[in-house]
Amino acid sequence: GIMTVKETLDFSARCQGVGARYDLLNELARREKDAGIFPEADVDLFMKASAAQGVKSSIITDYTLKILGLDICKDTIVGDDMMRGISGGQKKRVTTGEMIVGPTKTLFMDEISTGLDSSTTFQ
């Protein structure tokens, strides 16, 4: 099937899983409780939303769309050789987003600005 930008990032996140984020959140909650620490409501909500398992769309996907400037085209199909979709620069950012939404701790990227216009590279 043909997927939109948001569906592509959601699919990538589900394929990669939440990984250590879920276990880390549980351990952190246990240690905070033992130490009598109560996190701020906003921080607690974000942590729980970012580590939710089995959710079709996550806050991490929405955040990634925003920081990569893809929120304006999130409902546009990505496209392929036969069907026009988003621009080439947007496709490069979708590829970067597919890596970011996973449980990675470190990303090694080489020449990530190649093919992007100067304003996008600056962002």
Image (tube, helix red, strand yellow):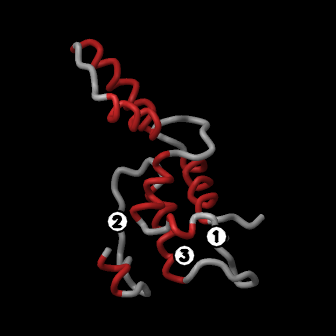
Residue 91 is marked as 3
Q: Amino acid at mark 3?
A: Lys
Spot occupied by residue 80 in the image (x, y as percentages of width and height): 69, 79
- How far separated are the C-alphas under marks 1 and 2? 28 Å
Left-right relation of 35 to 115: left
Seen at 28% across and 19% down, the residue is 31
Spot occupied by residue 95 in the image (x, y as percentages of width and height): 51, 69
Q: Mark 1 or mark 3, which is nearer to you?
A: 1
Seen at 59% across and 53% down, the residue is 10
State whether residue 24 is above or below residue 114. Answer: above
State whether residue 80 is above or below residue 11. Answer: below
State whether residue 48 is above or below residue 17. Answer: above
Asked if the residues shown at circle 2 and circle 3 are in contact, with their CB atoms under 8 angstroms apart, the answer is no
Q: Secondary structure at mark 3?
A: helix
Residue at the spot of label 1: 76
Quadrant (top left, top right, bottom left, bottom right) of the N terminus: bottom right
- How far separated are the C-alphas under marks 1 and 3? 11 Å
Asked if the residues shown at circle 1 and circle 3 are in contact, with their CB atoms under 8 angstroms apart, the answer is no
Residue at the spot of label 2: 108
Seen at 54% across and 76% down, the residue is 91
